[in-house]
Image (cartoon, rainbow, N blue to C red):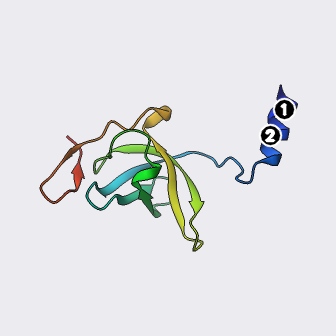
Amino acid sequence: MVQEQALHAAASPHPRAEREPGVVQWFSANKGYGFVEASADGVQLLVHHTEIVGRSPGAGQVVEFERRPDANGKLQAVAVTGVGGSDVQGARPTANGHSFAS
């Protein structure tokens, strides 16, 4: 089993990245993107709605994610989940489309 996993990981074009915690700075459901601040180093990373598992996150919500470069080489947050890999629970949207934690 371990050999199978090692072979699969070696064959994968995207090596498995480490997951890390961060805090949502803001997210616009209308625009389909927002920013997450990494807890480890304070870097703000773009997150696109297609990378969120669950609902649109709200400002201040703690999430977990992986860092990957986009087509231009800029790091972004991908595979964004709630703590422990759970679905993002989401937040209530405001009139301007930004989501804020309840």
The residue at 36%/59% (across/down) is 33
Q: Residue furthest top?
A: 1
The image position of residue 24, as x and y in percent, is 35, 52
Q: Is residue 17 above or below residue 85?
A: below
The image position of residue 11, as x and y in percent, is 81, 47
The circle drawn on residue 8 is 2
* SS category of the residue bearing label 1: helix
Foreground: 3 or 60?
Answer: 3
The circle drawn on residue 50 is none
Indicate the amino acid at tag 1.
Glu
The residue at 57%/45% (across/down) is 19
In what quadrant of the picture does the C terminus appear?
A: top left
Badge 2: residue crowd in 10 Å (few <14, some 14–19, many ≥20) = few
The residue at 52%/52% (across/down) is 78
Residue 40: in sight, yes or no? Answer: no
* SS category of the residue bearing label 2: helix
Indicate the amino acid at tag 2.
His
Residue 20: in sight, yes or no? Answer: yes
The image position of residue 74, as x and y in percent, is 55, 70
Foreground: 38 or 71?
Answer: 71
Badge 1: residue crowd in 10 Å (few <14, some 14–19, many ≥20) = few
In what quadrant of the picture does the N terminus appear?
A: top right
The image position of residue 50, as x and y in percent, is 44, 51
Residue labelled with disc 1: 4
47 on left or right of 58 = right
The residue at 72%/50% (across/down) is 15
For the residues bearing labels 2 and 1, Cβ distance under 8 angstroms: yes
76 on left or right of 6 = left
